[in-house]
Image (cartoon, rainbow, N blue to C red):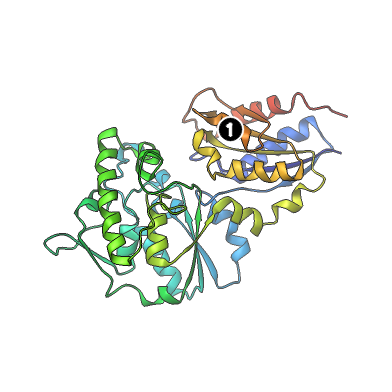
Amino acid sequence: MPIFVLAPDSFKGTLSSQQVIATMTEEILKLFPDAEIRPFPMADGGEGTLAVLRDVFDGSRRTIVEMADTCGLTLIPEYEWDPRRTSTYAFGEAIRAALHAGAEEIVLALGGSSTNDCGMGAMRALGARFLDEAGCELEGCGADLINVRTIDLAEFDHRIARTCFTALCDVDNPLLGPQGATYTFGPQKGATPEICAELEAGMASFAEVLAATFGRDERAAFGAGAAGGMGLASRLFLSARMVPGGEYLLDALGFDRLLEGADLCITGEGRADAQSAHGKAMSRVARRCRVHGVPCIAICGCLGAGAEALLGCGVSRLVPASPEPRSDPPEESVLRLRAAVREALQSLPRA
């Protein structure tokens, strides 16, 4: 009886990780009717993290707040994507609500955001004030970064100091530079090259103000560039412990136990590219599989430039559901996924 571990992330904007697993399971059982399926809905701090961890946190004083659920890219129509205008304010409101509810530990899922404001909006919701040269308070969006001169923390929520924050990062990028928040993820959020240059200048200026305010410079620290700079804000304003989101979930939900005796693990996400090897869910799953000697196949919506980097993480084969990015309705995405699963499994021996 073959044992399959299914650990996909969501196919962003089309299928949740649970829906992906259900589709994969149906196709596997057609080919291997006696197979044992071990499902493990995956996330890495981005979209779907809240759904995966909710049951783990039930009944505890821990809670999780997800950026994708409050200021996510999938929450706004594509024609409105503009990281100069979007804000993390709603994320800050969700943190404040968790504080009101008495949470002693708040887990921040940093991923899937539409924002590039370095957490200004969220910190405003928690009481921080960002002032320009004339002493006027700024709204707290990406376009405001360049204008911040001072930060007033006099009314910053006092409960934050006695609350434990853990930030789940789905990427390990620094704040600035070619691999930083703006140039790596800005185009995915609607930024043109000109807008990226504008936002990068704002980020650099804002980072200087942050360093002066907090007495330390963490722009190159792990996860600083996550979620349009929300990682850096989490470090400085919230004293958050930064951890790779995928690793946190794998440990919290006991993934290693599922690999015991498994014949194959199938992971996947909507799009694989060069960034997928830098802390994304698939790379985390594949590395665990390699340690346990379990073959790992990645089935993805499509393959972008640099996706082959996953082969160095422990993925033995990449199988795209489509040769190029698509915006199919869920039912068509399911059909493509079914075909990709059949293709991935056709070379496996059957009893």
> x, y percentage for residue 42?
61, 48
259 sits to left or right of 283: right
Residue beneath the point at 37% across and 53% down: 219
Q: Is residue 165 above or below residue 218?
A: below
The residue lying toward the viewer, choosing from 184 and 125, is: 184
The spot of residue 126 in percent (x, y) is 34, 68
Report if residue 213 is visible in the image: yes
Q: Is residue 332 something one can see in this rendering?
A: no
The crowding category of the residue bearing disc 1, from other C-alpha atoms within 10 Å (few below 14, some 14 to 19, many at least 20), is: many
Judge from the rendering whether residue 304 lies leftward or rightward of residue 149; answer left or right.
right
Quadrant in the picture for residue 212: bottom left
The residue that label 1 is drawn on is 300
Against 344, residue 225 (above or below) is below
Q: Which residue lies at the image location 77% right of the left edge and 31% below the top edge?
A: 30
Report whether 49 appears left or right of 344: left
Quadrant of the drawing holding the C terminus: top right
Foreground residue, 162 or 14? 162
Q: Of helix, strand and loop, which one carries label 1?
A: strand
**Amino acid on which the number 1 mark rests in the picture:** Cys
Instruction: Quadrant for residue 216, please give it.
Output: bottom left
x and y percentages locating residue 79 in the rendered image: 31, 36
Counting the numbered discs, the total is 1
